[in-house]
Image (cartoon, rainbow, N blue to C red):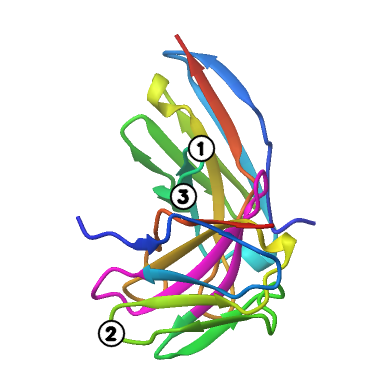
Amino acid sequence: RKEVEQDPGPFNVPEGATVAFNCTYSNSASQSFFWYRQDCRKEPKLLMSVYSSGNEDGRFTAQLNRASQYISLLIRDSKLSDSATYLCVGRGSGGYNKLIFGAGTRLAVHP
Amino acid sequence: EPEVTQTPSHQVTQMGQEVILRCVPISNHLYFYWYRQILGQKVEFLVSFYNNEISEKSEIFDDQFSVERPDGSNFTLKIRSTKLEDSAMYFCASSGQRGETQYFGPGTRLLVL
């Protein structure tokens, strides 16, 4: 099983839509979790951390279900500027906390 | 806002040549990382560095790779004899403490011909 697995998409949605991304993880990537955003040919940028209690940052909501080893990201009221690849990331359970990246889910928001 | 910087932004080299990729982490950070991303693939961990030594490395980080912090600000990745398959975007990252957010530099795009 891949350490962090995501649906690659692409997700093509109109402006204003709500879109949800899912991610599953294995035990080796299970210490803590994040969603990063990556624009084409750019570096990953932290979008938000993911907590078991769920957390919200404006239009973005992240959830973690440790029992199912499942992480989600919900984007409400999509903007054109949300078009990017969203990376589900786990922190390794050993060593010095390397990040383990999923392959990313591509989102395209159109007018 | 402090940021991680990397030079060069692009590097083209011949197979078998040595390359050095440079990074300046955020100034008060203590943990440093290199990741790479082959075109169209996921970001992969290469190595982490703390207290002037490698703390963890991946299978990719073989004897052709080395890292160094030659002074108080730079953090370098050296590839001794480049292969075609080393062509990728190389990202440097740093964090203040173990477990804190890792901030990524803009990357160096390496093309090996």
- Tag 3: amino acid: Pro
Query: Where B63 falls versus A41 (above or below)?
Result: below
- Tag 1: amino acid: Cys
- Tag 2: amino acid: Gly
Numbered disc 2: secondary structure: loop
Question: Which sits in the foreground, B79 or A54?
Answer: B79
Q: Chain of mark 3?
A: A
Q: Which mark is residue A44?
A: 3
Q: How far is disc 1 from disc 2 in space, using C-alphas?
A: 32 Å
Extreme residue in the bottom direction: B52
Drawn side of residue B109 relative to residue B31, left or right: right
Residue wearing tag 2: B72
Question: Which sits in the foreground, A99 or B113?
Answer: B113
Numbered disc 1: secondary structure: loop
Q: Position of residue A76 (x, y in %)?
A: 42, 23
Numbered disc 3: secondary structure: loop
Question: Magenta part of the protein: which range?
Answer: B24-48
Q: Position of residue B24 (x, y in %)?
A: 33, 70
Q: Chain of mark 1?
A: A
Extreme residue in the left direction: B1
Q: Nearer the viewer, mark 2 or mark 3?
A: 2
Residue occupying image coordinates x 51% and y 42%: A41
Q: Nearer the viewer, mark 3 or mark 1?
A: 1
Q: How far is disc 3 from disc 1 in space, using C-alphas?
A: 10 Å
Residue wearing tag 1: A40
Query: Same chain, marks 1 and 2?
Result: no
**Is residue B67 in the magenta section?**
no
